[in-house]
Image (spheres, helix red, strand yellow):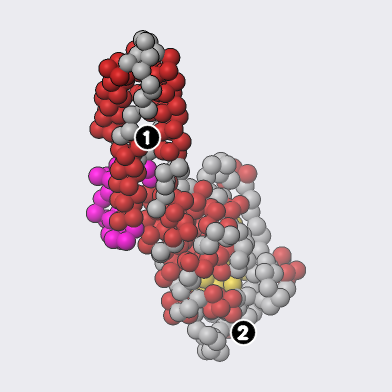
Amino acid sequence: MDSTEWDSVLQYISDPGDFPSPQSERPVSEMAGISLHPQQFAPHSLTPPNPDKSTPSDSQDPTSHDLPENSVVSVSTTFHPGANLLSIPPDLILLSSDGVFFYVHTTRVLSASRNHFNDLVPPKPTKATLRDDLGPVVVLPDAATVLNVVMHTVYDISPTHYRPSLDTLVAAVDAMAIYGLSPKQYIAPSTPLYSMILSQAPVQPIVVYALAATHDLYDLAVPVSSHLLSFPLYCLTDDLAVRIGPVYVKRLFFLHLGRLDALKRLLLPPPHPHPPTEICDFTEQKKLTRAWALASAYLAWDARPDLSTSAMESALCPLADHLCCDICKKSLAERVKQLIVQWSVVKRSI
């Protein structure tokens, strides 16, 4: 059927009150009215009804008057029969767990999958399976929002305008792995899915890091790990540790421990002494050295991998208030400046 024929079959309903706020996910399906025949609604039928086809037995079936002539079903707003995503009509229908129909192409799905879509899609549907030109129905356990992201990935279309939540994106990536779509291939730095997931990292970095670790998405895990500098490692649950895996758990621990060790080493050297003067001899300069040692010990004792440069300045710069020597004050300021520069270049990601 061409798109003009489908226009007479599908009656899309758009109620302004149904649209979510800009912060929520957009709907991935719309209600469509489809003409049905009683025989096509067989309890064990895996193929949706074709409104253009009927059999003589329909008029002879005594139950035909008990069924409505039109039924309203949910159809994907992107993957509907008249979408014209390819030059050929769709020949496969995926049904989500919440009852949304996705009209797709067998060749496209199988070319993206390495396991025949978890062995749910045959290479060529048999005539016994096909009841009309719409193709067989494959019932999937995923919600429509999740399946929508997966299908956009299969067709190399950006799902950004749907604004999927992080939970949806995580479930979609996990589903991709199950259906034989390589997450490494489809979540590369240049892909829309990569950008969408990375944009969620500041909100829930540990969830995104766990997702990247699960599928060994190193290019995603690296930038996400910089948002985990403030994450308390003792809050890492057993379930998260299992999902992340030993390799990426070790990398996260080494990132934290490495920055703490670097901070202690950077704090150790005191300001450089200067030649003795009339008002500031070596004994007087030792006061600055002791004050620096106390202040740096305070910072090191309560150090965090995400220690800010402003916290360093707040702890060290007030030492100048107790100095009478201008040269010592200048030396202290130069040492604090050097420390901030050195700390800013310490590695912030795995």
Q: Is residue 67 above or below residue 119?
A: above
**Residue at 34%, 55% in the rendered image:** 251
Q: Is residue 342 visible?
A: yes
Percent x, y of residue 262: 34, 42
On the image, numbered disc 2 is attached to which residue? 56
Q: Quadrant of residue 218?
A: bottom left
Q: Of marks 2 and 1, which one's residue comes earlier in the chain?
A: 2
Left or right of residue 227, residue 258 in this image: left
Give the residue type that dot 2 points to: Pro
Please state which of residues 343 and 139 is positioned toward the viewer in this rendering: 343
In the picture as drawn, the residue positioned furthest to the right comes out as 4
Q: Is residue 106 above or below residue 314?
A: below
Is residue 235 located in the magenta-colored stretch of the structure?
Answer: yes
Please state which of residues 198 and 178 is positioned toward the viewer in this rendering: 198
Judged from the image, the secondary structure of the residue bearing numbered disc 2 is: loop
Percent x, y of residue 249: 31, 56
Residue range in magenta is 228-248
Label count reads: 2
Q: Is residue 323 above or below residue 59?
A: above
Percent x, y of residue 71: 57, 64
Q: Is residue 188 above or below residue 120?
A: above
Please state which of residues 142 and 256 is positioned toward the viewer in this rendering: 256
Left or right of residue 158, residue 46 in this image: left
Q: Is residue 64 visible?
A: no
**Residue at 75%, 68% in the rendered image:** 4
**Residue 307 disc label:** 1
